[in-house]
Image (cartoon, helix red, strand yellow):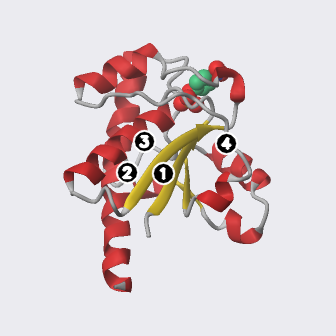
Amino acid sequence: MKKKILFVCLGNICRSPAAQAIMQKYVDDAGLQNNFYIDSAGLYAGHAGELPDPRMRQHARRRGYQLLHHSRPVNTSDFNEFDLIVAMDDSNFHGLRRLAPTIEDQNKIIRMIDYVKGYPQYHSVPDPYYEGAEGFEIVLDLLEDGCRNLLDSLISQQTESN
Ligand code: 4NP
């Protein structure tokens, strides 16, 4: 059965669609498309239906990621659908915990930053929306580091349970 992972930020137009594309590329590169299903969503529905922010699309494209997801709000049914829900910052983490229908669902929520190893000065994946180019670059740096480690950790878990 596929492990289903949902990345969540506020608007679902910057951080989480970037995380989705990065993780999908790592999954594809590892030939693990049959083992993982990756999606993203936002806690704020104001950008629903939109493609990612043009600034994020441009910065991501330079690193080889095409961001084609359309923003959608996170829904309580996502807690049934997904095995793992990955929050970009503390506000997302607490917002998701408030939405989670059960304690078991709350336990599916993790923080992206807990998988980032190379940037100890960061305690969240910061919202780049009101930042300049540097803000988008650091988000991509953090997400590449965190997605790599998260995928490695999930692959080890799958190997152990087989
Ligand atoms: P994201 O960035 O949560 O990484 O998608 C934001 C996008 C939009 C807004 C805030 C953050 N906004 O306030 O519209």
Report the front residue among 96 and 69: 69
First-in-chain label (1 vs 3): 3
Q: CA distance from mark 1 to mark 4?
A: 17 Å
Q: Is mark 1 within 8 Å of ligand 1?
A: no
Q: CA distance from mark 1 to mark 3?
A: 12 Å
Q: Which mark is residue 20?
A: 3
Q: Is mark 4 within 8 Å of ligand 1?
A: no
First-in-chain label (2 vs 4): 4
First-in-chain label (4 vs 3): 3
Q: Which mark is residue 22?
A: none
Residue underneath mark 2: 146
Q: Amino acid at mark 4?
A: Val
Residue underneath mark 4: 74
Quarter occupied by residue 73: top right
Q: Secondary structure at mark 2?
A: helix
First-in-chain label (2 vs 1): 1
Tell me if residue 36 comes above or below residue 158 in the rendering.
above
Q: CA distance from mark 2 to mark 3?
A: 12 Å
Residue 44 lies left or right of residue 39; in this view the side is right
First-in-chain label (2 vs 3): 3
Q: CA distance from mark 2 to mark 4?
A: 21 Å
Which image quadrant: the N terminus? Answer: bottom left
Q: Amino acid at mark 3?
A: Gln
Crowd class of label 2 (few under 14; some 14 to 19; many from 20; radius 10 Å): many
Residue underneath mark 1: 112
